Image (cartoon, rainbow, N blue to C red):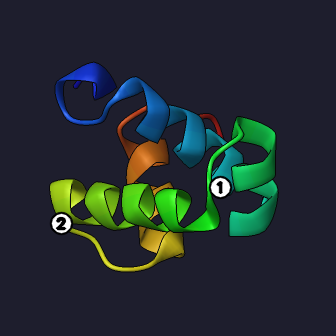
Amino acid sequence: MNPECVLTHRQMQILRLIADGHNTKAIAERLGVSARTVEFHRYEMEERLQVKGTALLVRTAIQRGWIKP
């Protein structure tokens, strides 16, 4: 499945940074947004993918081939 069908470009950016081990504050600084914005995108991704938590979010992205392990 193509991630563009499910996640926005910004959400994919954030997901890749999460998978690389960056925390919310570091992601926010890198992207020039607030930590609250990053948390909102994380929440939206979990809702769209029907998962709860960072580990399942990353696992789902790996399983779908959106990011490499």
The structure residue drawn at horizontal position 29% and vertical position 35%, both measured from the top left corner, is: 7
Q: Looking at the image, which residue is at 20% across and 35% down?
A: 6
Q: Which residue is mark 2?
A: 50
Q: CA distance from mark 1 to mark 2?
A: 17 Å
Figure quadrant of residue 24: bottom right
Q: Is residue 5 above or below residue 45?
A: above
Helix, strand or loop at mark 1: helix
Secondary-structure class at tag 2 = loop
Image quadrant holding the C terminus, namely top right
- The answer to whether residue 15 is above or below residue 43 is above
Q: Three-letter amino acid code at disc 1?
A: Ile
Q: Is 37 above or below relative to 9?
A: below
Query: Which circle marks residue 18 in the picture?
Result: 1
Amino acid type indicated by mark 2: Gln
Packing grade of label 2 (10 A; few <14, some 14-19, many >=20) is few
Is residue 52 toward the left or the right of residue 66 in the image?
A: left
Q: Quadrant of the N terminus?
A: top left
Name of the residue lying farthest toward the bottom: 52
